[in-house]
């Protein structure tokens, strides 16, 4: 049906000045990456572009800057150092629009490195745990190399491709990278409780990965008829699905299915989604499309931030001018939930950093980027309560956000903001 080659043979097609897209998240094609990086002596100015990836990123070593340049659409920990070192760049883009960069040849791709399941009897592979913009990359790259893994789950939805769409195959049999999430802290449990109280029965949820989303999910056991329409999910949803708390019965979009564009978690998660028709993975230009999201009644979007100023501006991608993560799908879902009938857009964050710095601030740090604007913001939640900013004046917002800041910082936030507006 198809002929396999070694990883070293497969990546020989890549030449200097090419742009290469990597399959994202837990579907990162590590064998192909390692083989490509091993060619660094003979390559110059190869651009590696991708969203968040798990695992190792050897091409991001600053010592290889003449061979590889990293173009991140979302900055993960494994390549964060490249921005300062000069061998990496960040391209801000909504996840809903990333496929358009490839479809319109704004970002012209020569090669796509992907990670797929073993083909079925009809010759169809699955993109497994990550679809996001990879379909658009496959359709628009000149050459597609697939790492074919016996341990990649077969998932339903958009990520089904025929072997005829792939130019080279490299077989492997290895586990996917897992993403372990620590137990929520006392503070995160308090935040989770406030958020859980905002969620009504028959709501549809969007939430990411992390301790606060897990804290929220752990408190939803008595809810009824919830749905899932989310950029990504992890292990926290499994038990709620098995208990029929999350069943999708009242969703307008893909009812009776849990919808996402990628997922990461433990081996239990990968085993659960394998050949499971309840789980549907679709391209990010569908899952994250505001016009699609808003059709779900009672859509609840739960996102986080690095800091929020007292007017409601949300910085979620940088620490000051230092790029830290990315725009991702926050604005897609904040807007979609806001336009949903009965929807709620929530930003949830601890009131202070681990070093005690307030995350509710009089003004954003110099150079900080605004991911969610003050006009889009609805709810902000910390361990000290809930501030509903929708329809509120700047003065009312400032008061509400100061009230959910850490008590040690409330007076100084109020005082500094007063100085800013009064001069």
Image: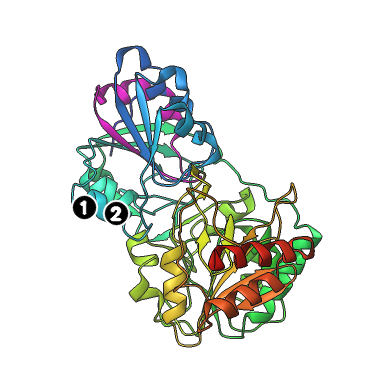
Q: Where is residue 163 shown, x and y percent of the image?
A: 28, 44
Say if the magenta span includes residue 22: yes
Q: For the C terminus, which image quadrant?
A: bottom right
Q: What residue is disc 1 on?
A: 103
Q: Residue 112, located in which quarter of the rendered image? A: top left
Q: Residue 10, located in which quarter of the rendered image? A: top left
Please tell me which residue is depicted at 75% across the width and 51% down the height of the picture: 356
Q: What residue is disc 2 on?
A: 99
Calculate the distance from the C-alpha at mark 1 to the C-alpha at mark 2.
Answer: 6 Å
Please tell me which residue is depicted at 39% across the width and 54% down the height of the picture: 132
Q: Is residue 137 visible?
A: yes
Q: Where is residue 137 shown, x and y percent of the image?
A: 28, 46
Q: Image check: 353 left or right of 329?
A: right
Please tell me which residue lies in front, 98 or 123. 98
The secondary structure type at the circle numbered 1 is helix
Please tell me which residue is depicted at 33% across the width and 25% down the height of the picture: 5
In the image, the segment drawn in magenta is: 7-34
Whether residues under marks 1 and 2 lie with C-beta atoms below 8 angstroms apart, the answer is: yes
């Amino acid at each position: 049906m198809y002929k396999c080659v070694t990883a070293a043979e497969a990546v020989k097609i890549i030449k200097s000045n090419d742009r290469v897209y990597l399959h994202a998240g837990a579907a990162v094609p590590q064998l192909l990456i390692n083989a490509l990086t091993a060619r660094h002596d003979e390559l110059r100015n190869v651009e590696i572009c991708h969203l968040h990836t798990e695992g190792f990123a050897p091409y991001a070593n600053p010592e290889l800057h003449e061979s590889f340049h990293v173009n991140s659409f979302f900055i993960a920990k494994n390549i964060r150092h490249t921005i300062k070192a000069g061998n990496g760049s960040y391209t801000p883009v909504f996840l809903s629009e990333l496929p358009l960069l490839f479809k319109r040849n704004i970002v012209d791709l020569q090669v796509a490195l992907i990670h797929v399941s073993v083909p079925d009897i009809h010759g169809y592979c699955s993109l497994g745990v990550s679809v996001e913009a990879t379909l658009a990359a496959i359709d628009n790259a000149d050459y597609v190399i697939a790492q074919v893994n016996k341990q990649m789950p077969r998932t339903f939805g958009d990520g089904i491709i025929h072997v005829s769409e792939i130019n080279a195959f490299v077989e492997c049999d290895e586990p996917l990278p897992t993403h372990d999430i620590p137990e929520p802290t006392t503070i995160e449990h308090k935040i989770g409780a406030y958020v859980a109280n905002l969620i009504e029965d028959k709501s549809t949820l969007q939430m990411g990965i992390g301790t606060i989303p897990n804290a929220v999910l752990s408190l939803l056991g008595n809810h009824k008829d919830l749905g899932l329409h989310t950029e990504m999910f992890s292990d926290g949803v499994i038990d709620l699905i098995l208990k029929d708390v999350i069943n999708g019965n009242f969703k307008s979009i893909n009812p009776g299915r849990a919808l996402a564009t990628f997922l990461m978690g433990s081996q239990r998660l990968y085993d659960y989604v394998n050949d499971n028709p309840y789980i549907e993975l679709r391209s990010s230009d569908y899952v994250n499309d505001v016009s699609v999201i808003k059709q779900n009644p009672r859509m609840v979007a739960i996102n986080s931030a690095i800091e929020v100023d007292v007017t409601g501006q949300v910085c979620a991608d940088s620490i000051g001018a230092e790029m830290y993560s990315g725009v991702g799908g926050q604005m897609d879902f904040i807007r979609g939930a806001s336009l949903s009938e009965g929807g709620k857009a929530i930003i949830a964050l601890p009131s202070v950093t681990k070093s005690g710095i307030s995350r509710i601030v009089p003004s954003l740090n110099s150079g900080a980027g605004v991911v969610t604007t003050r006009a889009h913001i609805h709810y902000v939640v910390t361990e000290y309560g809930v501030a509903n900013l929708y329809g509120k004046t700047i003065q009312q917002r400032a008061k509400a956000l100061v009230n959910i800041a850490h008590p040690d910082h409330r007076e100084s936030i109020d005082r500094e903001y007063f100085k800013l507006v009064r001069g």
